[in-house]
Image (cartoon, grey):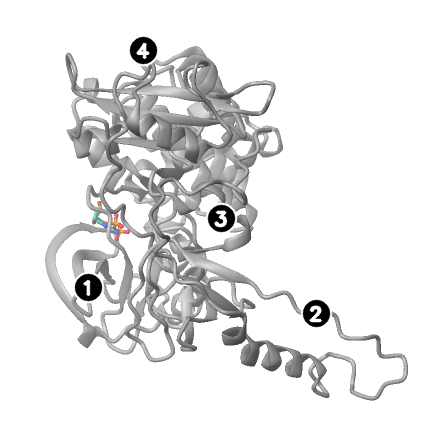
């Protein structure tokens, strides 16, 4: 494992840090409040005066640094300034923490916008993008189209880092360099120039190409901030008066989907639920839980407008629409095997998160995944199938039932599980590697059911690597318990990406 030595890394430039420092005294009142809460009767702490009470342990103050700016508009929220430090007062809720800024103002902030100062490591640098595949790095840099534009990302080998660098010399291309480490623990790209930390190495190559195709000159402009779990803390009911409805994005099973702007600043997709298509009260209860599901490969549910009819489901907006349409309209040569595999890996990561939270999708397919900026693919509509009232959709004999994505136990006994999602994921991989073909072509549903019962599976897509087809086949094992979990599939697919396609 490489150590990034984040604690004692020298600053990249000699300029004074813009990060405002918080003095200990500004933290003290909050510290006292925390200590008081712990010792209050009924607060779960030791009542004062108890003979066996041990001396109080000093509370550790948790300080976080903002990775993205955040603008508070709801009362009780606090704005974040990128790079500034905040003291955490209450992190008992997973997604919204109460923090204090350097002026003593207190409020809620989205926890995915900050990182603990002690463990921030490389994340404080503009050029570090963490988990980003080679394909996505290429797409981000190509979009920027600047000579010497670069990012540092986690390599597919755990604990290693890769520099992705864009150059226009000869023809526009992105080069990828592994950051290596010698036996003295120094980092290097070319073994003539070793540095004691990665930021130092980056700084060196900003001034000297030293074996690279060009010097490191720029980083991609402000990258989009991730969506928050709900539009504010404890908020899942959205006032429709605060939503401006814009163009139609598409229409589906439940009705029309339009782009919306919330309070003039947050892009959203608004699904207007046709009346009578879903059991609304049950769904509204569930929506509270669903806003709390948060992952970079899940379309974020922001909330619902449930006080009028039709009800609206408000989610994160995904610029390129459904994965199915994206595959169909994009030229196959633009989507080489590496890009296609990366799309599957992203869906698999979102599904592994749902699996970890014991959440079953029930209708996973390319049409229910969406594509956003930077080739990001996210899973949408998870769990919605449970609230559909239409028998044609919910019963396996119905005309709208997704038979072609269903395993034998769903066809026979409507037995859904994460392993039935795994089967559907295999079909989704097939859709991806055929660039949006319809599984089982024009076969009738009854013929598909027969074929699946007989143990026959979809054929290998043209040009698909055996290693990738083997993963699909593992998803289509007859017995659910013999299919791999999403957690395992994620590792499997990462292994394929590493061994068959370059990192
Ligand atoms: P339904 O669930 O009612 O069948 P869909 O979720 O499939 O509807 O949405 C219909 C279409 O609307 C999609 O194919 C897609 O083009 C568009 N759409 C849906 N959600 C979004 C979103 N979050 N961002 C952008 N486009 C979306």
Q: Is residue 253 above or below residue 35?
A: above
- Circles 3, 1 touching at the beta carbon (< 8 Å): no
Q: Quadrant of the C terminus?
A: top left
Q: Residue 42: percent from the left, percent from the top? A: 71, 86
Q: Quick check: is the Cβ at mark 3 less than 8 Å away from ligand 1?
A: no
Q: CA distance from mark 3 to mark 4?
A: 42 Å
Q: Which residue is disc 4 drawn over?
A: 463
Helix or strand or loop: what does disc 4 sit on? loop
Please state which of residues 187 and 389 is positioned toward the viewer in this rendering: 187
Q: Residues within 10 Å of mark 2 (few under 14, many from 20)?
A: few
Residue 149 appears in view: yes
Q: CA distance from mark 3 to mark 1?
A: 29 Å
Q: Is residue 34 left or right of residue 94?
A: right
- Circles 4, 1 touching at the beta carbon (< 8 Å): no
- Foreground: disc 3 or disc 1: 3
Q: Quadrant of the N terminus?
A: top right
Q: Which residue is disc 3 drawn over?
A: 120
- Circles 2, 3 touching at the beta carbon (< 8 Å): no
- Circles 2, 1 touching at the beta carbon (< 8 Å): no
Please state which of residues 101 and 230 is positioned toward the viewer in this rendering: 101
Q: CA distance from mark 2 to mark 1?
A: 42 Å
Q: Residue 473: percent from the left, percent from the top? A: 48, 21
Q: Is residue 484 above or below residue 60?
A: above
Q: Which residue is disc 1 drawn over?
A: 265
Q: Residue at x 38, y 16 (%)?
A: 459
Q: CA distance from mark 4 to mark 1?
A: 44 Å
Q: Residue 400: percent from the left, percent from the top? A: 30, 45
Residue 133 appears in view: no
Q: Is residue 329 left or right of residue 118?
A: left
Q: Residues within 10 Å of mark 3 (few under 14, many from 20)?
A: some
């Amino acid at each position: 494992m490489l150590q990034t030595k984040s604690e004692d890394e020298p600053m990249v430039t000699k300029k004074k840090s813009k990060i405002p420092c918080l003095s200990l005294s500004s933290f003290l009142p909050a510290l006292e409040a925390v200590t008081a809460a712990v010792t209050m009767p009924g607060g779960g702490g030791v009542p004062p005066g108890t003979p066996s009470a041990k001396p109080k342990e000093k509370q550790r103050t948790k300080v976080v640094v903002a990775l993205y700016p955040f603008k508070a508009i709801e009362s009780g929220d606090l704005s974040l300034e990128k790079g500034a430090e905040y003291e955490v007062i209450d992190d008992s809720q997973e997604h919204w923490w109460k923090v204090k800024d350097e002026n003593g103002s207190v409020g809620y902030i989205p926890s995915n916008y900050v990182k603990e100062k002690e463990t921030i490591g490389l994340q404080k640098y503009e050029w570090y993008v963490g988990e980003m595949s080679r394909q996505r790095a290429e797409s981000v840099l190509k979009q920027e189209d600047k000579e010497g534009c670069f990012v540092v990302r986690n390599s597919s080998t755990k604990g290693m880092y890769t520099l992705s660098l864009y150059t226009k010399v000869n023809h526009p291309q992105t080069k990828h360099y592994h950051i290596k480490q010698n036996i003295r623990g120094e980092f290097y790209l070319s073994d003539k120039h070793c540095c004691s930390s990665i930021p130092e190495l980056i700084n060196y190559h900003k001034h000297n190409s030293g074996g690279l195709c060009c010097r490191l000159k720029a980083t991609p402009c402000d990258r989009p901030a991730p969506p928050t779990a709900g539009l504010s803390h404890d908020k899942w009911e959205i006032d429709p008066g605060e939503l401006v409805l814009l163009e139609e994005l598409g229409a589906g099973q439940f009705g029309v989907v339009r782009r919306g702007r919330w309070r003039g600043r947050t892009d959203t997709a608004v699904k207007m639920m046709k009346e009578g298509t879903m059991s609304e009260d049950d769904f509204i209860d569930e929506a509270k839980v669903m806003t709390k599901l948060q992952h970079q490969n899940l379309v974020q549910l922001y909330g619902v407008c449930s006080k009028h009819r039709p009800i609206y489901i408000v989610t994160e907006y995904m610029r390129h629409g459904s994965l199915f349409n994206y595959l169909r309209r994009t030229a196959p040569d633009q989507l080489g095997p590496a890009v296609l595999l990366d799309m599957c890996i992203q869906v698999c990561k979102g599904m592994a998160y749902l699996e970890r939270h014991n959440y079953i999708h029930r209708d996973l397919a390319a049409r229910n995944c969406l594509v956003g900026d930077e080739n990001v693919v996210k899973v949408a509509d998870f769990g919605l199938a449970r609230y559909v009232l239409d028998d044609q959709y919910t019963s396996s004999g119905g005309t709208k039932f997704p038979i072609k994505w269903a395993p034998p136990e769903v066809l026979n006994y409507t037995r859904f599980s994460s392993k039935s999602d795994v089967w559907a994921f295999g079909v989704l991989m097939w859709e991806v590697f055929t660039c949006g073909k319809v599984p089982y072509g024009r076969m009738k549903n009854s013929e598909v059911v027969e074929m699946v019962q007989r143990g026959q599976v979809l054929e290998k897509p043209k040009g698909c690597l055996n290693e990738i087809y083997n993963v699909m086949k593992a998803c289509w094992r007859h017995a659910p318990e013999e299919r791999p979990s999403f957690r395992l599939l994620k590792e499997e697919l990462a292994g394929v990406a590493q061994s068959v396609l370059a990192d």
